[in-house]
């Protein structure tokens, strides 16, 4: 990927620059770019305490409403995770 040079607007707004670079990187890699936050990430943690913290932060950000969990069907490299999750689920039930 070529070096990304920020334009005038991006020089004034580092968040805009970062998001534009992130989108370009995702496009170059052929993957989707999700607008997830740290609070969204917490919802995927192993401990219930951290998952509840994520829900609490998201509810505060969204007027008391916890948005539905995002559904991912591929990992960052485009590999299907549905098959992997089904295998993991069936192993837990054994």
Image (tube, helix red, strand yellow):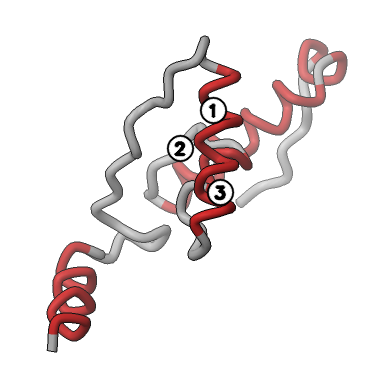
In primary-sequence order, the first of circles 1 and 3 is 3
Q: Which residue is mark 2?
A: 34
In primary-sequence order, the first of circles 3 and 2 is 2
Q: Secondary structure at mark 2?
A: loop
Q: Secondary structure at mark 3?
A: helix
Q: CA distance from mark 1 to mark 2?
A: 16 Å
Q: Nearer the viewer, residue 59 or 22?
A: 59
Along the horizontal axis of the image, is 8 left or right of 86?
A: right
Residue drawn at x 51%, y 32% as measured from the top left: 35
Q: Nearer the viewer, residue 40 or 32?
A: 40
Residue 65 percent coordinates (x, y): 43, 18
Residue 79 percent coordinates (x, y): 28, 65
The quadrant holding residue 74 is bottom left
Q: CA distance from mark 1 to mark 3?
A: 10 Å
Residue drawn at x 70%, y 21% as measured from the top left: 16
Q: Which residue is mark 1?
A: 58
User: Total label count?
Assistant: 3
Q: Which numbered mark, 3 or 2, is in the foreground of this view?
A: 3
Residue 38, above or below 50: above
Instruction: Mark 3 and mark 2 in contact? Answer it, CB < 8 Å.
Output: no
How crowded pointer 3 is (Cα within 10 Å; few <14, some 14-19, many 20+) is rated as many
Residue 31, above or below 12: below
In primary-sequence order, the first of circles 1 and 2 is 2
Q: Nearer the viewer, residue 2 or 29?
A: 29
Q: Which residue is mark 3?
A: 42
Q: Nearer the viewer, residue 93 or 32?
A: 93
Residue drawn at x 64%, y 36% as measured from the top left: 21
Q: CA distance from mark 3 to mark 2?
A: 15 Å
């Amino acid at each position: 990927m070529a070096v990304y040079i920020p334009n005038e607007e991006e020089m004034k707004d580092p968040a805009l620059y970062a998001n534009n670079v992130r989108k370009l990187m995702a496009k170059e890699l052929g993957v989707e770019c999700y607008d997830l936050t740290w609070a969204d990430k917490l919802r995927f943690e192993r401990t219930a305490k951290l998952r509840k913290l994520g829900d609490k932060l998201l509810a505060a950000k969204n007027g008391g409403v916890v948005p539905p969990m995002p559904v991912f069907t591929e990992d960052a490299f485009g590999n299907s995770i549905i098959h992997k999750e089904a295998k993991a689920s069936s192993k837990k039930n054994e």
